[in-house]
Amino acid sequence: MRLFLDTASVDEIRAAAKLGVISGVTTNPTLWAKAGGGNYRDIVVEICNIIDGPISAECLSRDVEGLVKEARQVASWHPNVAVKIPIDEAGLEATSRLSKEGIKVNMTLVFSPNQALLAAQAGATFVSPFVGRLDDVGHDGMQVVADTVQVFERYHLPNQVLAASLRHPLHVIAAAKVGAHIATMPYSVLMAMLRHPLTDVGIERFLADAKKAAKAARGTGKA
């Protein structure tokens, strides 16, 4: 399973890129606003220059012709850009047309296996079930990911399941267990995956023991 970062913060992306574990980025208008706004195209292109992998950029038009026109423009920003389109009638029609042109689409705001199957049939490269938002309303978001993976594998569909709206490290592991191709997460979740109190204690103990050993060696003249 590949790991993507869900943010529009260039600083977070630069920091995560140094770790060598992130292979893509997903952005949306909410994340763009949280990152302070600015020129969206410039931000997306900068991200593309940091991470050599799929970079999802949202389309805001709500009619088919507007979506197709906007998606073509956004996709032209960089070869790695995948356009994000919400699933509805207009989104499906636009995705069907765009996929035939070779434009990568990340179909977003997917909340059921039925929607995921429709997105796949329309030719979306990435299909993004939103786990956390489903959990928020009392549904099992990860089950939607699992069901989607099962359907795609059963019929050998080439579309990739991108588990989105992940809120904590357990979501990431659960997505991996059910076979999601990609998990996208905030920077805070990535850092939470890295941290463990026993690791911190172990490092401190190793350093303390190394100091003791060095001091003992100096005392015996073997340093």
Image: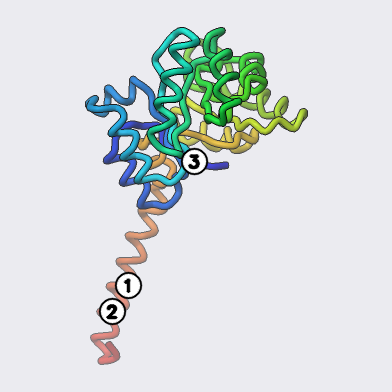
Alpha carbons under labels 3 and 1: distance apart: 35 Å
Q: Count the marks: how many?
A: 3
Mark 3 vs mark 1: in front: 3
**Residue type at tag 1:** Ala
**x%, y% of residue 76?**
41, 32
Mark 2 lies on residue: 214
**Foreground residue, 166 or 3?**
3
Mark 1 lies on residue: 210
Q: Secondary structure at mark 3?
A: strand
Alpha carbons under labels 2 and 3: distance apart: 41 Å
**x%, y% of residue 216?**
28, 82
**x%, y% of residue 75?**
44, 30
Residue drawn at 31 percent across, 46 percent down:
15
Instruction: Using a 10 Å C-alpha cutoff, classify the residue at mark 2 as few (fewer than 14 neighbours), some (14 to 19) or many (20 or more).
Output: few
Residue 111 in which image quadrant = top right
Instruction: Using a 10 Å C-alpha cutoff, classify the residue at mark 3 as few (fewer than 14 neighbours), some (14 to 19) or many (20 or more).
Output: some
**Residue type at tag 3:** Leu
Mark 2 vs mark 3: in front: 3
Q: Is residue 218 left or right of residue 73?
A: left
Q: Is residue 16 above or below residue 28?
A: below
**Foreground residue, 125 or 127?**
125
Mark 3 lies on residue: 3
Q: Is residue 114 above or below residue 54?
A: above
Q: Are marks 2 and 1 in contact (CB under 8 Å)?
A: yes
Alpha carbons under labels 2 and 1: distance apart: 6 Å
Residue drawn at 43 percent across, 12 percent down:
66
Instruction: Using a 10 Å C-alpha cutoff, classify the residue at mark 1 as few (fewer than 14 neighbours), some (14 to 19) or many (20 or more).
Output: few
The answer to whether residue 185 is visible is: no
Q: Secondary structure at mark 2?
A: helix
The answer to whether residue 180 is visible is: yes
Q: Is residue 64 left or right of residue 77?
A: right
